[in-house]
Structures are given as C-alpha cells and as structure tokens.
Amino acid sequence: MPVKFKGLKKFQRPMLLCSLCSNCSATCCSFKAYGWESYTPRARVAMSRYYVEGVFKDDAKYADRLYNCTMCKECEANCSAGFSPWEVFQAARIDLWTAGKAPAVLKPVNTNIKETGNVLKFNKDARDAWVKDVKQKVATDGKNLLFAGCIPAYKNGDALKKLATLYHAMGMPLSVIPGNQEACCGLPALDSGNADLFNELVAKNIQEILKLKPDRIVFACPSCYAFVNEYYGQESADFKKIPLVFYTDDLLKGIKEGKVRVKGFYKPTRVTYHDPCHLGRFSMLWDSPREIIKAIPNADYVELMNCKDHTACCGSGGQLMVVSPEANSKIADKRIGEVTEKNVQILVNTCFTCQNTLQGAAFRSGADDLEVLHILDIIDDG
Ligand code: SF4
Ligand code: SF4
C-alpha cells in the first residue's frame, strides 16, 4: 500500500492552533538567513492557512516561502501549540507540486531520480563501483544489508570501502543489493512534493530488499535512515519487521569490543559534533557518535549550543541547496559561526552532505585552525 499523504486542506483545523506566538521563529534557520518575517515558520503556517482558504492567492510568493525552508523540523520541536508546522509544509509542498507550482529548478532533480535512480544523474550501473576494491570483504548473502544511499555510493566510495572493511573486521560483513538495484530512498522527491515518485521508489526498494530476506539493514546516510524508518514500514508490514541500524551504533560496539580502533590526537584538541537534523531531531540518535569521538585519546569534547534535538541545520535540507544555494550557504556560515565561537579545532560529522556543506562554510570563514572531518576519518583503517 503506498504511503498516504494528506493535502493541506486536512490541516485547516490544526493550523488554527497556531497562536502566532513566534516561539518557533528565532531558531528557524531560514528566518536567520533571510531576516524577513515572511520567512518564519509562523508566517508559513499563516500563509498556508490563507492560501488553502483562497484568501492569499500569490502562487509564486507562496511557493518561494514554502520551498525556502530546509524542512529541518526545528519549528516542530519549538511549537508551543504542540502541532507540527513541518507536516503542514510537507502537505503544502505536495499540493504545490501536484498543481505544477513548485520551483522549476526541482524538475530536473526529479527527472534524474526517475531516469537513473539517483539525484546526481550518475550512471545507474556505477552505483556499486566502490565494491570492486573491497569485494573480498563484502558478503553476498544479503543478511547484513547496507543501504548505501545516492551521495555515499556515488560521491563517497572511499568512505564506503572503509565501512565495509570495518564491518568485515567486526565479523559481520556488509552485503549490497545486487545488480545496482538500490534506488534513491525517495527523500529528494518527497521534499520536492513529488509524493508519486516517492512512493514508486519506496515500492522498488522494498521489493529488492525483501527478496534478500535481510536480518538487518545498515545505513550510511542519516537522511535515508530517517525516511526509510519513518515511511517504508507504512508501505510494507514485512519490511517493518526488519531492524534498521545506523553505522555509528555498530562501530561504537566494535570499539568497545576492541575490534575497531579510533585514531588519536598527539596533543589535547577541542572537538565537537554536528548533529545532522535527520539523525538528531528526526531519529533521536546522538549518543554513539559522541561516544566514538570521546574515545579518541586527547579529545577535549565540547558541545555546541544548538545540539541533539535542537541541532541547527547545515542549510542543505529540504532541497534548499537546489532552490537557493545562497540561502544554503548563509545558513551553513551561521552554523560554522557557532563552531568557531567555541574555539573548536575539529568539527565531526556523520552525514556526507552536512560534511560537504560545512567544509565549504569553514573555508569561507577563514578559520585556518578548524578542520571539518567525517567520523570515519577519526577511525583507524583496520
Ligand atoms: S522546518 Fe526549519 S527552516 Fe523550515 S520553517 Fe521550520 S524551522 Fe524554519
Ligand atoms: S510556535 Fe507554533 S503556535 Fe507559536 S507561532 Fe510557531 S507555529 Fe504558531
């Protein structure tokens, strides 16, 4: 059964709960980037309410405000009325996409996914190209199945090779979906408002995964992890029974058992961690990355002001990196500002997209003594 999404009309009553208190505004990264009231969550809710009632009719302005949002869910975490502005925005995007009023720049993204199964329009057959160098360390039984995700598979093959090596060392080799049949998890389609394509991808992935009868699925990308967790079980009861695991939980266990080792700093070094929205706020998984970092000899761990379920977005979520690269950069710059004010020397990420975005912001900031690393960079090659 395809995942059923509600249209904006179904949110008319919940939207009335918004008292315009503005509790959600100050921490909204989109508002921080633009500085205009109409880019606050409460303004988006009010606009949605008047749009669905037919009072506000400016399609272009409405689409601009709704898509210039990272879908980071921070407004839901802060809403004093206890409802989810995020669900309103998701419904609004689905309505706008269906009516052909979504930003035109999102169309190629959706065409790429439809034609190649990935957002980047890479050759479908190259999805598992990283496997050839570690073939002897990758299982074929499908039991400990890796869901690689588009960005790791095509852009971060070296990291996946290392992950495969580490899992092999832990005695639980990863398998991949054979024949390059893994497809995009569907998040970029859903963020575009394209619920039909999202459902197509969910159905395809579930079909391929169930053929393998996996004991568990390991995720290399926080966004795939969050959205597969949230939606795939709604489509298939059999899928819902499969345990889903984010790789840092396994690596921490491997460290505790002495099968995986962290690298060390030769002198005390201030280190912090950026919770990706999809891991921190959406999945509430924040302990294992911190414990791994704290296990590094000489790591002086400091916490950022906005962390865990109140983490600040890197700026790339909600397809903002496609809709407005400028706003994306401004938000990333603000996040890096939070890091530099703590005099941190190493910022660790668990998400390849956050990693890339924050690396760019760190470079722009001119903070020569700040290094932005992926958590796999601080783990020994094994
Ligand atoms: S989802 Fe994030 S960016 Fe969008 S309105 Fe809410 S707090 Fe702002
Ligand atoms: S916190 Fe909730 S009730 Fe208050 S303005 Fe924001 S969306 Fe409305």
Image (cartoon, rainbow, N blue to C red):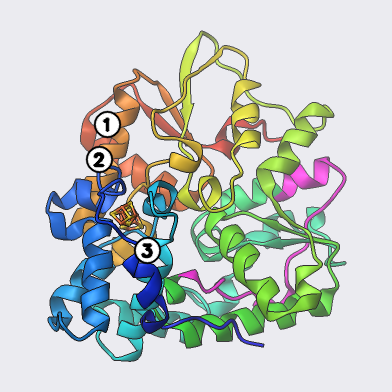
Cα distance in 3D space between marks 1 and 3: 22 Å
- Snapshot quadrant of residue 228: bottom right
- Disc 2 on helix, strand or loop? helix
Q: CA distance from mark 3 to mark 2?
A: 17 Å
Q: Nearer the viewer, residue 81 or 361?
A: 81
Q: In terms of sequence position, does the residue under pointer 1 or pointer 3 come before the other?
A: 3
**Residues tagged 2 and 1 counted as in contact (Cβ below 8 A):** yes
- Front one among 362 and 178: 362
Ligand 1 within 8 Å of disc 3? The answer is yes
Question: Label 2 belongs to which residue?
Answer: 333
Residue projecting furthest to the bottom: 99
Tag 3 residue: 318
C-alpha span from label 2 to label 1? 6 Å
Q: Quadrant of ligand 2?
A: bottom left
Q: Is residue 233 inside the magenta stretch?
A: no
Identified at 49% across, 74% down, the residue is 118
Q: Residues within 10 Å of mark 3 (few under 14, many from 20)?
A: many
Magenta span of residues: 164-187
Residue sitting farthest toward the top: 267
**Residue at image coords 15%, 52%:** 34
Amino acid tagged 3: Gly
Q: Amino acid at mark 1?
A: Gly
Q: Which mark is residue 337?
A: 1
Q: Position of residue 259 (x, y in %)?
A: 82, 32
Is residue 293 shown above or below 197? Answer: above
Looking at the picture, tell me which residue is in the foreground, 182 or 304.
304
Residue 352 - label: none
Sort mark 1 into few (<14), some (14-19) or many (20+) by Cα contacts within 10 Å.
some
- State the SS at label 1: helix
